[in-house]
Amino acid sequence: MASKLYVGGLPYSTTSRELRDQFGRCGTVVSANVLTDRLSGQSRGFGFVEMSTQTEAQAAIAKLDGQPFGGRRLKVALANPPAVRSDRPRKETIGGGPRRTSRW
């Protein structure tokens, strides 16, 4: 079963291809994605890598966490599972914000 890793501390010039190549030394990379800002398109300095097995993911953490990469130190850890939308509390607002009333 594949394991997803969070990778922080990436240089802002890092591409998804470079991230894939870096983690490819630890095993089979299913996917690698550097997150970018929606408006500017610039890297946000972190990304996610999916390794094909948990063993390879643990090997990547052991080998790459804290290692220098492009002048910065990598932070590699198991990614937290995404929250399910139904688990989030609902806001009880109307029209996008709290309802305000005025006596004037």
Image: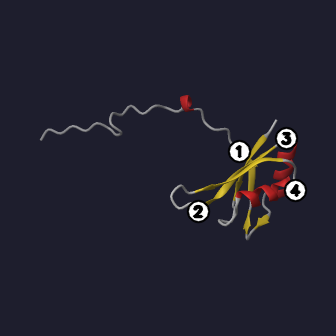
Q: Is mark 4 on a helix, strand or loop?
A: loop
Q: What element carries label 1?
A: loop
Mark 1 against mark 3, which lies toward the viewer? Answer: 3
Mark identifier at residue 79: 1
Q: Residue flagged by tag 3: what amino acid is it?
A: Thr
- Of the two numbered discs 1 and 3 on the same chain, state the one appearing first in sequence: 3
- Of the two numbered discs 4 and 1 on the same chain, state the one appearing first in sequence: 4
Q: Residue flagged by tag 4: what amino acid is it?
A: Arg
Neighbourhood count class around disc 2 (C-alpha, 10 Å): few under 14, some 14–19, many 20 upward: some
From the top left corner, tell me how far across and down residue 55 is, in percent: 87, 43
Mark identifier at residue 60: none
Circle 3 residue:
53
Circle 2 residue:
42
Neighbourhood count class around disc 1 (C-alpha, 10 Å): few under 14, some 14–19, many 20 upward: some
From the top left corner, tell me how far across and down residue 20 is, in percent: 78, 55
Asked if labels 1 and 4 touch by Cβ distance under 8 angstroms, the answer is no
Q: Where 43 sits versus 104, above or below?
A: below
Distance between mark 2 and mark 4 Cα atoms: 26 Å
Q: In this view, does 102 lie to the left or right of 16?
A: left
Distance between mark 3 and mark 2 Cα atoms: 30 Å
